[in-house]
Amino acid sequence: MRKIHVAIAALAFAGIAQAGEYHRLAQLRCSDCHTMHFSRQHAFDSTSADPGWAVHSATPNNQLLIEGGVNTTCLACHDDSANGPDVLEANVGGYVAAGTRSAGHLNDAGTADEFEGHSLDATATPPGFPWTAGVAWAGLPMECENCHAVHGSRAYRNLGLGRVAISQGFLSSGGATAQTFNNVGPTYTFTATAGAVDPNYDVTIESNSAGGPLNGTSANTYETAKIKFGKGAGNPTDGYFTGSSYVAQGVSQKTPVVNGMNEYCAKCHGAFHGSANTLGTVVGTTQHYIRHPTTGVVRASNTLFTTGAFTGVVGLDPAQAMDSADGAVVRAVFTAAGKDTWEVGCLTCHKGHGNSRPYGLILPDHQGAVADYENGDAAALPDGSYSVRNLCVTCHSMGRSF
Amino acid sequence: MERPAARLLVSAAIAALAAAPAGAGEWHRLGTLVCSDCHTMHNSRGGQPMRYDDSPLPSDWLLRAAGADEVCLACHSGTPGVPTVMAPSDFEPPGGGFPADLSDPASHAHALGPDPILPPDGDTAVVMGCTTCHDPHGNSRYRNLRPSPSGTGRAAGVTISVAQAATANGVNADEVYLRANLTYRAGFAAWCMDCHNLVYGAHTPEVALSSSDSVDLAHWLNDPITNRVPVQNPSDLVVPSGDDQVFCLSCHKAHGSPHYRMQLWADGESGSGVATCVQCHTK
């Protein structure tokens, strides 16, 4: 019995949430998601059953999951629960402050909200797929584990090591096929300085502990205003998941490419990404964009782009646009700590999960302080739709009336 | 492919409620400039192309058609509630319209195309397209006209002044683009001469009818005249009146007409065009 009590104590201590580092290593609690015998009559401290870890379904489930599938297992804590950030539709439970979720929220396939972001259980081919010729989407339902490593990775928000079913098989971290989701997770670090960004990392999280995770008050690190995007250094390190302790506090694996967040989105939405897909043919000395640029086009103070005469953002001070109230909700990918040069990223315009706006787009009202970091504060049009111009004029001066 | 007619109706409601309304009479600027009417970021919506011609290929400038003219014409060629520019006319709408062949082989309109063209009575070749004369993102000028379409800057300092009786709200194009609701005040001849800078003669630049012995002013002022041609009124809003000036649009349509050199025939297509001249010159 003593051995059991020791084990219980160890598990309880490991239950302390650590900002940005949850669901991996010591914070990976097997019993959060799995049950050995599909029986839970009490919690690990032998008190009455803890509803946060109760077995919910009527019969045992594959892979010893507490629910009938990956999505429902994740949502046991990540939907309508105070146990973790609510990632599906309304923010219930209060784990993350209202209107602040950095990734916004998912929706369910088959609902009226399906056009507003990533849809759980959706089987449609992602827009902008494939990332490589000859690969077909296998049409299996979209699951949390398509993007997040359920047993943790060394990347921001456990991205990377995603499992996606394609025509060549079901890619997994241990499969023999090409591990497309391996070594592409966005890198991240922490800062204690409000609003600071380290452009050597894809993501900078503001915390109360410089250079490392914080204890006890992790919820705000899921808030939009606490998270800044940087270009990243694209410097690969050893192994993607060693199961050992950190190499150093707050240092995560770096990806082989810069702008790791864009690169990650491009694994499914690749046709929208990169110069090959966004730059048109050269006519004389002129080359225009055919899709909105992502990685590689740097907007610097009061200058045009470095190639050609792209006039899309002429006459607009990028520092004013992005190091401002607007910039806290429409987040650039900063290429310098001074935040006066930046690129645009997928997550500049879209929420990673989605939100309550078309295509997960962020629509600010450019009227000063931000109230709604998930959707932006722009009001609906009389017919209930929203004007995308609110987003465009953040960077582009045409149509600006403020 | 869908046309944004419904969106234009919504935009009309926006204009009515907007705290910062569009400039007098003008559409396609500020709050009435809808980015997604013309541009698409990824040419994908639900996996389907967003181009008006249904092409899956993305286009330069992130346009929803092969080029700027095609984008403009996706709306301005018969969409309900949107002024059309594809019907050559003598009278309504005031700007006239283009023939089906935009290259205008019969010289009835401003020829549009990708290659520079030397304007009649002009010395600077210009690539003519919709956006040569009109700013697609809007400006503070009448009909969003650019200050210097030729790029020479000749007319950059010219102020075009037009009194409009109707303000665009997205559903009243037939009122806004109606000759009876427009009174030209100043600047048009000088603006046209930004490209047609070598035009000379008694009709230029903006000549008061009262200043010429060849004009039968009494006829112009006192007699009933059918399909009275446009004139400029620098001093008042009354036509006819003593300040009336002949200018380019007195005899030519801005976009095109059924006639050579975009002439405006007061007696219409079935006439001879002489009716235009005799409104002022009865001798």
Image (tube, rainbow, N blue to C red):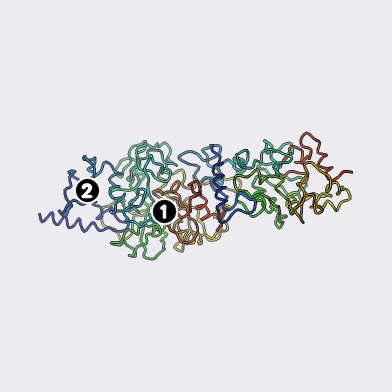
Q: Residues within 10 Å of mark 1 (few under 14, many from 20)?
A: many
Tag shown at residue B254: none
> Of the residues shown, which amino acid type is indicated by label 2?
Ala
User: Residue B117: x and y, percent?
Assistant: 71, 44
Query: Which of marks 1 and 2 precedes in the sequence?
Result: 2
Name, please, the residue furthest toward the left: A1
Quadrant where the C terminus of chain A sits is bottom right
Q: Residue at point 58% right, 40% down?
A: B66
User: Residue A267: x and y, percent?
Assistant: 40, 45
User: Residue B173: x and y, percent?
Assistant: 64, 44
> Label 1 near label 2: C-beta < 8 Å?
no
Q: Residues within 10 Å of mark 2 (few under 14, many from 20)?
A: many
Tag 1 secondary structure: loop
Name the subunit of mark 2.
A
> Of the residues shown, which amino acid type is indicated by label 1?
Glu
Q: Which residue is mark 1?
A: A374
Q: Residue at point 25% right, 58% down?
A: A16
User: Residue B106: x and y, percent?
Assistant: 74, 36
Tag 2 secondary structure: loop
Task: Describe residue A172's horizontal placement relative to residue A12 as left or right.
Answer: right
- The answer to which of B68 and A75 lies nearer the viewer is A75
Name the subunit of mark 1.
A
- The answer to which of B127 and B206 lies nearer the viewer is B206
* Quadrant of the image occupied by residue B105: top right
Q: Is residue A8 above or below residue A34?
A: below
Tag shown at residue A54: 2
- The number of callouts visible is 2
Label 2 and label 1: CA atoms lie apart by 31 Å
Name, please, the residue furthest toward the top: B270
